[in-house]
Amino acid sequence: MKFPSIFRTANPSRFDIKPRYYDPVKEEIEQRTSRIKKELEADGVISKGDNSPNFSYQSGIRGAFAQHRGIKERSSNPLTSTGMIRTFIFFILVGGLGGYIYLGPVIFEYILYLTMIVAGIYFFFRLKPKRKNE
């Protein structure tokens, strides 16, 4: 219950925002429609003021999948795949653990030397210039 007063207290201000509605599907449909109309005008199928085409409608699914270029092709090199890299790391860890149990701390030196040799061979072939015939 509020008591009468000669002083006015401030009321909390209301947050009133009018949201703008954005429909990405509708936007894409409008862009595609305008692009197709421009292509048809360029081909001479429809005139600039005319919205009715001079041909019968057919399915638009025929070229829809061929035009999409969003998915990149996978690399054909198996050494760059994450599964292969994980497998190499797993074998190095298991080999290091088993070698530590059987040989002691000297296995880490052997693994370090082997890793340096493999890395050297890899970078040699990676940085070696390729022949023009291949």
Image (cartoon, rainbow, N blue to C red):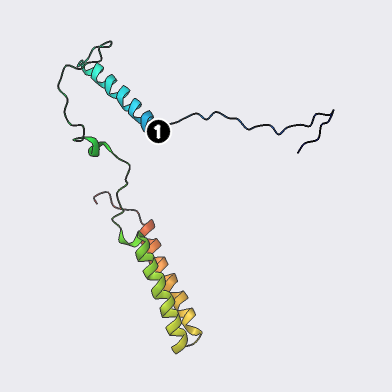
Tell me where residue 67 appears, x and y as whole percent: 26, 36
Judge left or right: residue 58 versus residue 70.
Answer: left
Tell me where residue 96 appears, x and y as whole percent: 45, 79
Q: The residue tagged with tag 1: helix, strand or loop? A: helix
* Residue found at the very far left of the displayed protein: 56
* Residue found at the very far bottom of the displayed protein: 102
Judge left or right: residue 33 versus residue 17.
Answer: left
Three-letter amino acid code at the position of disc 1: Pro
| Nearer to me, 26 or 99 | 26
> Which image quadrant is residue 15 in?
top right
| Nearer to me, 59 or 75 | 59
Judge left or right: residue 104 versus residue 63.
Answer: right
Q: Is residue 86 above or below residue 133?
A: below
Q: Is residue 83 above or below residue 39?
A: below
Q: Residues within 10 Å of mark 1 (few under 14, many from 20)?
A: few
Residue shown at 30% from the left, 40% from the top: 69
Number of numbered tags placed on the structure image: 1
The N terminus, quarter of image: top right
* Residue found at the very far top of the displayed protein: 49
Residue shown at 44% from the left, 70% from the top: 116
> Which image quadrant is residue 5 in?
top right
Which residue lies under the disc numbered 1?
24
Tell me where residue 52 appears, x and y as whole percent: 22, 16
Residue shown at 33% from the left, 42% from the top: 70
Tell me where residue 62 appears, x and y as whole percent: 18, 35
Judge left or right: residue 33 versus residue 93.
Answer: left
| Nearer to me, 56 or 79 | 56
